Structure formats: structure tokens, C-alpha cells
């Protein structure tokens, strides 16, 4: 089971009855002389390179296990610009391709996440690719003399690798669907509007994403200067490249602080509108019809942030809750407990509203737009507090990937998670990747529950 790529031959393994090629480099390690520089082509190798284990993740802080989601432990390393490929059959050609960008607030995560492995897509005739990319300051810091969007350039490098190499794995480079969740969904929307990504994919899936998750260049440069001052260095590539990654990680802000006055703010680390790689705010570009030739499937869960926010604002008084909710554009409901009111407001502001804005902006699109909402509610009580898990952020992932047997699913979804819903959702995603139609009319929101 050997495949020849542009950089050399790789040998894979078998996972759940399909072929898997894990940790395949799509770019050179972005450290040493390459640190804070655009991705370079992978270094060629002689012989056959084993591709039987997940590759290193980008440097990141260890994730806190709050008793929800997959208990993933990622292994960071310098050779982090790698991808995993799952394919049903090396002896065929022209299979549809799904390229996946993981979420994590642009600061955590990896392509090896247990709820996002693509073997079940390969089982159903799709060549699945999941790519790592630089995270945090390594990927999105706007230094004075370095590109501001290194993580974005990594996405482009992965897509170009797919175009050049995926035929060797049975895939059709002209039939690529790009998909992502949360920050990965925002990445997909951003790429939909980028000239450099034109022609690299033909369909998009945006799960719990945003079309406004970008920072103005002036703001990003100012943040880099503030960080440089704290570290006692200049905001230049040379100075930052001399710092160990651990020093930068120690300065990274968390995706959500838990402070009431910042609950409605988006993640602090994100792509930058530099006028070149990222020409403008994606939502504005989509509203003018840019990316409108791409078929789109987009949606979110109904209770994305509820359980987290309820825990953060436990004990909040009614007046403060009302002010917080109305400040986020959410109508006051005296029937709701104060913590529940704020929780729903944050979910509305960061997820439901963002999805609606994206769908409305697509009114100028030529290609169809398909919408969904995931409403199945887990009955599990969150061990971290905040009440029942409900239709929480990330819960739709094991359903879309049809991996209800993956680690951590039972403790988040309970023992009775409906396999029928996983078959329905996963089947819709497969149909969209294969035919561009998930199985319901365009412009009509499908409720998944």
C-alpha cells in the first residue's frame, strides 16, 4: 500500500476497512530559518516514508479536559504542517474529495481529533483529507516584516498539495469540497472570498462558523507591538523567531475569558485583513457575490455556548443579565432565569446570528445554499457545571462524521445517542460532497434532531 507523492513515496495502513495515510507533510517544518515565513514545499525524501501514525500538531497549550468532548491529547512538534488522507480504494480514480479544517479558536486543535477522523467518509466513497496549520501567534501574529496570515497560507498550501497529489489516492482534484467547524468554518468562509484560493475547491461546508472572524491590519499590528513590548523585543521576525515557542504560548489569551463584558467578543487570535492574502471582511465580499459560484452547506447547533456561559455567569442578578442580553442584541424574556438568558444571548450573538448573516449575504450567490440546524439535545449533565449539555458546540461533529463510537462521545451525548440521526446527518454530508445536494431544497433550513 504505497503511494507516490510529489515529494516522495509513502506507505499507509488500514483503518476501519479503508486506506489511511497519516502525517504526510504538505510543507516543510515552519521553524528554524522558516519560522514566521510562508510555508515552503516539503523536503523530498528517498525510499518509502511510513505514514501510519498521526503527525505532530502545531504548538499549543494543553487543552483543559472539562468532561465534555473528545479527551484528545495532541503531540505538538516542529513538523506540524502535515495532513491525513483516508481513501476507500487506491485502484480507482475520480472520487470526490473532502478537505477538512479543524477548529479550536485558531489556537488549539489538530487533524487527529477523535471526533473528526474521516474513515467513515472514505467508507462511503469519499477521499478525506484533514490538514494541520500553524496556530496562535505562530500562525496569526502581524509582525512588521512578516506576513500576517501564515496560518491562512498554510491552508492554501494544503489545498495546493491536494490539487497536485490527490489523484494518486483515487481522488478527483477538480471535485473538492472544503469543510470546517467553528474556527475551521470561519477559515472556509475566508477562503471562499480569497483570490489565491480560486479554483482549489468547488463546494463549501461551514459548521458553526463565522464570516466576520477577521481582524483589521492596524489592530493586529498594534497587538503585535503590545506583545513585543511585554516580551522586551522588537515586533520583527528576527526577534520573535529567537523566542522559544513556549514563551509565546505563555502570552496567548484564552479563546473565551469568562468575563461578563467580553462574553460577546470573538476569539482574540484570527486571520487579518491585510488587503493581499485576505482582501477584506468575508461577509462583505460574499454580499457582493464573491464566492457565489460555490455551493454552500451551512448551519450550527441550537445551544452552542449555553452550557459554558451558564457556568460562567452562575448567580448573576436579573438586571445585569438583562443588560448583558440586550447589549448582545437578544430580546429580554422575563420567563428565563438570568443565567439562561445570558447563555442564549451569547449563543445567538456568536453563532446563530453569524450563520444567519452568512446565509442572508448569499442572496447574491449563483450556486445553491443549503441551511441546517442541529437541535438534538444531549441529556447529560455537564460535570463542569452549567446544567445539561444540550445541543452544545461540537456535539454535531460525531454525528456528521458518523463516529458515535469515538472516545468521549458517550460522556457528552450519553449512552443513547441516536445512530439514526448520525446516519441522516452523515449521509447528507456525503451527498453534498458527492452531488452538491444534501437531500433537501435549497433555501429551506433542515432541522436535525
Image (cartoon, grey):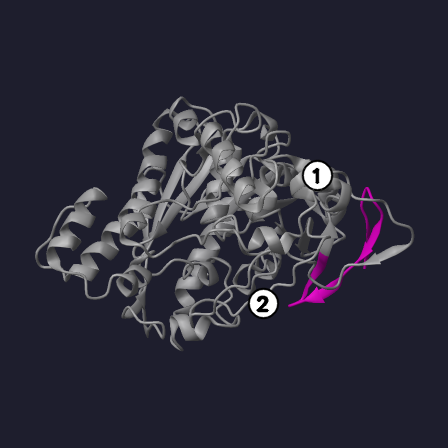
Measured as percent of width and height from the top left, residue 245 is found at 64, 52
Measured as percent of width and height from the top left, residue 274 is found at 53, 27
**Residue 421 drawn in magenta:** no
| Residue 273 visible (yes or no) | yes
**Nearest the camera: 16 or 148?**
148
As measured in the structure, the alpha-carbon distance from the residue carrying label 1 to the one carrying label 2 is 25 Å
| 417 shown above or below 251 | below
| 349 shown above or below 237 | below
Question: Is 258 on the left-hand or right-hand side of 155?
Answer: left
At 54% across and 28% down in the image, what residue appears? Answer: 194
**Nearest the camera: 36 or 399?**
36
Measured as percent of width and height from the top left, residue 331 is found at 14, 46
Instruction: Please provide the residue range marked out in magenta.
Output: 1-22
Measured as percent of width and height from the top left, residue 248 is found at 58, 50
Disc count in the image?
2
Question: Is 421 on the left-hand or right-hand side of 240?
Answer: left
User: Would you call the spot at circle 1 few (<14 residues within 10 Å), some (14-19), or many (20 or more)?
Assistant: many
* Residue 142, image quadrant: top right
User: Would you call the spot at circle 2 few (<14 residues within 10 Å), some (14-19), or many (20 or more)?
Assistant: some
| 145 shown above or below 399 | above
Q: Secondary structure at mark 2?
A: loop
- Which label was assigned to residue 263? none
For disc 2, the marked residue is 73
- Which label was assigned to residue 39? 1
| Residue 204 visible (yes or no) | no
- Quadrant where the N terminus is found in the figure: bottom right
Amino acid at each position: 500500500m504505497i503511494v507516490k507523492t510529489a515529494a516522495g513515496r509513502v506507505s499507509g495502513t488500514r483503518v476501519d476497512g479503508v486506506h489511511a495515510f497519516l502525517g504526510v507533510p504538505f510543507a516543510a517544518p515552519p521553524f528554524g530559518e522558516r519560522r514566521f515565513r510562508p510555508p515552503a514545499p516539503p523536503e523530498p525524501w528517498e525510499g518509502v516514508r511510513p505514514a501510519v501514525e498521526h503527525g505532530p500538531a502545531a504548538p499549543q497549550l494543553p487543552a483543559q479536559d472539562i468532561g465534555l468532548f473528545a479527551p484528545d491529547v495532541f503531540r505538538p512538534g516542529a513538523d506540524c504542517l502535515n495532513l491525513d488522507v483516508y481513501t476507500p480504494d487506491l485502484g480507482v480514480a475520480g472520487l470526490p474529495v473532502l478537505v477538512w479544517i479543524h477548529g479550536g479558536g485558531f489556537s488549539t486543535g489538530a487533524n487527529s481529533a477523535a471526533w473528526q477522523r474521516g474513515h467513515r467518509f472514505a467508507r462511503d466513497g469519499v477521499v478525506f483529507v484533514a490538514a494541520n496549520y500553524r496556530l496562535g501567534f505562530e500562525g496569526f501574529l502581524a509582525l512588521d516584516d512578516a506576513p500576517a496570515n501564515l496560518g491562512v497560507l498554510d491552508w492554501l498550501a494544503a489545498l495546493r498539495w491536494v490539487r497536485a497529489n490527490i489523484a494518486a489516492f483515487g481522488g478527483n482534484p477538480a471535485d473538492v469540497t472544503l469543510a470546517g467547524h467553528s474556527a475551521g468554518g470561519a477559515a472556509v468562509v475566508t477562503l471562499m472570498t480569497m483570490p489565491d484560493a480560486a479554483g482549489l475547491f468547488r463546494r463549501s461546508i461551514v459548521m458553526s462558523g463565522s464570516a466576520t472572524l477577521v481582524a483589521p491590519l492596524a489592530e493586529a499590528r498594534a497587538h503585535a507591538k503590545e506583545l513585543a513590548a511585554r516580551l522586551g523585543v522588537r515586533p520583527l521576525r528576527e526577534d520573535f523567531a529567537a523566542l522559544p515557542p513556549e514563551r509565546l504560548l505563555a502570552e496567548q489569551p484564552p479563546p473565551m475569558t469568562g468575563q461578563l463584558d467580553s462574553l460577546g467578543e470573538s476569539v482574540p487570535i484570527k486571520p487579518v485583513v491585510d488587503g493581499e492574502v485576505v482582501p477584506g471582511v468575508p461577509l462583505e465580499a460574499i454580499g457582493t457575490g464573491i464566492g457565489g459560484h460555490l455551493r454552500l452547506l451551512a448551519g450550527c447547533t441550537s445551544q452552542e455556548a449555553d452550557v459554558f456561559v451558564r457556568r460562567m455567569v452562575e448567580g448573576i442578578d436579573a438586571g445585569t443579565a438583562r443588560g448583558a442580553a440586550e447589549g448582545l442584541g437578544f430580546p429580554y424574556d422575563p420567563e428565563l432565569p438570568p443565567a439562561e438568558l445570558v447563555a442564549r444571548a451569547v449563543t445567538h450573538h456568536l453563532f446563530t446570528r453569524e450563520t444567519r448573516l452568512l446565509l442572508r449575504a448569499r442572496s447574491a450567490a449563483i450556486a445553491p445554499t443549503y441551511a441546517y440546524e442541529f437541535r438534538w439535545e444531549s441529556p447529560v449533565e455537564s460535570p463542569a457545571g452549567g446544567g445539561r449539555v444540550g445541543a452544545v458546540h461540537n456535539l454535531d461533529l460525531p454525528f456528521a462524521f458518523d463516529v458515535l463510537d469515538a472516545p468521549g462521545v458517550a460522556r457528552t451525548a450519553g449512552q443513547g445517542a441516536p445512530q439514526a440521526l448520525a446516519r441522516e446527518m452523515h449521509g447528507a454530508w456525503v451527498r453534498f460532497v458527492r452531488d452538491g445536494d444534501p437531500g433537501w431544497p435549497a433555501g429551506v433550513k433542515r432541522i436535525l434532531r
